[in-house]
Image (cartoon, helix red, strand yellow):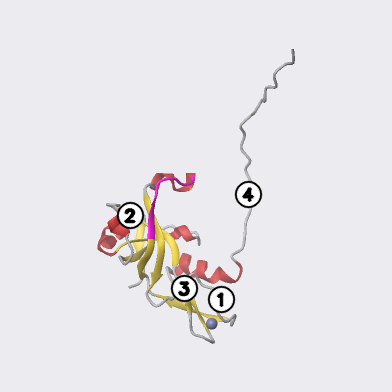
Amino acid sequence: MSEEFQDHQIRDVIKINYKYTMGGQSKFFIELMNNKKLLGTKCAKCGKTWMPPRINCSDCYFPTDWIELKQTGTIEVSTIVWYTTSAFIKAVPYGIGFIKLDGAETSLLQGIFSENLVPSKIKKGKRVKAVFNKEREGKMTDFFFVPEDEYDNWISKPEYEGGKY
Ligand SMILES: [Zn+2]
């Protein structure tokens, strides 16, 4: 008679402090944090406007120039998030979607919050505006989008503020 193997497991936590660079896209995060600007890039050759910004045009590989984009846009596609990481668990359920900012030719993946989140609120073609955290760290989570008709409510909350319109 052989003894049955029993696996003994211990749950533990690894904490790692580290930093990383945003490299050539650092200007986007610095302007977001300090000035609530949403910067895209424009190809110096073909004129395509990229958001999120690309340092070189992905169509013709030419270098791009920084440009400030409007903080309004249109939802291209979206979904509602029900499962997420611990960092966002308190916000569930929330929307996420690809948003084409006015003046950009590509779309940015970003959170879409609503006080009355139903699929029709964040469907394709709906207009959204950017809302910024008052405390910004130079991260994508410094801002999010809300339906245009909820914008005034969101920026009246103590933790948020509006951008430039
Ligand atoms: Zn180009």
Rendered image quadrant of residue 90 = top left
Q: Which mark is residue 114?
A: none
Q: Judge: label 4 CB < 8 Å from ligand 1.
A: no
54 sits left or right of 104 in the view: right
| Amino acid type at image mark 4 | Asn
Upstream in sequence: badge 1 or badge 4:
4
Q: Which residue is mark 4?
A: 17
Cα–Cα gap, marks 2 and 4: 30 Å
Assess mark 1: CB under 8 A from ligand 1? yes
Which badge, 2 or 4, is on the more N-terminal residue?
A: 4
Q: Nearer the viewer, mark 3 or mark 2?
A: 3
Q: CA distance from mark 4 to mark 3?
A: 29 Å
x, y percent for residue 40:
47, 74
Which mark is in front, 2 or 4? 4
Which residue is tagged 2? 158
- In this rendering, which labeled residue sits more in front, label 4 or label 3? 3
* Vertical position of residue 3 compared to residue 94: above or below: above
Which element is circle 4 on?
A: loop
Q: Residue at 44% of width from left, 59% of height from top?
A: 142
Q: CA distance from mark 3 to mark 1?
A: 17 Å
Q: Amino acid at mark 2?
A: Pro
Q: Callout 1, which amino acid?
A: Ser
Q: Which residues are magenta?
A: 78-85
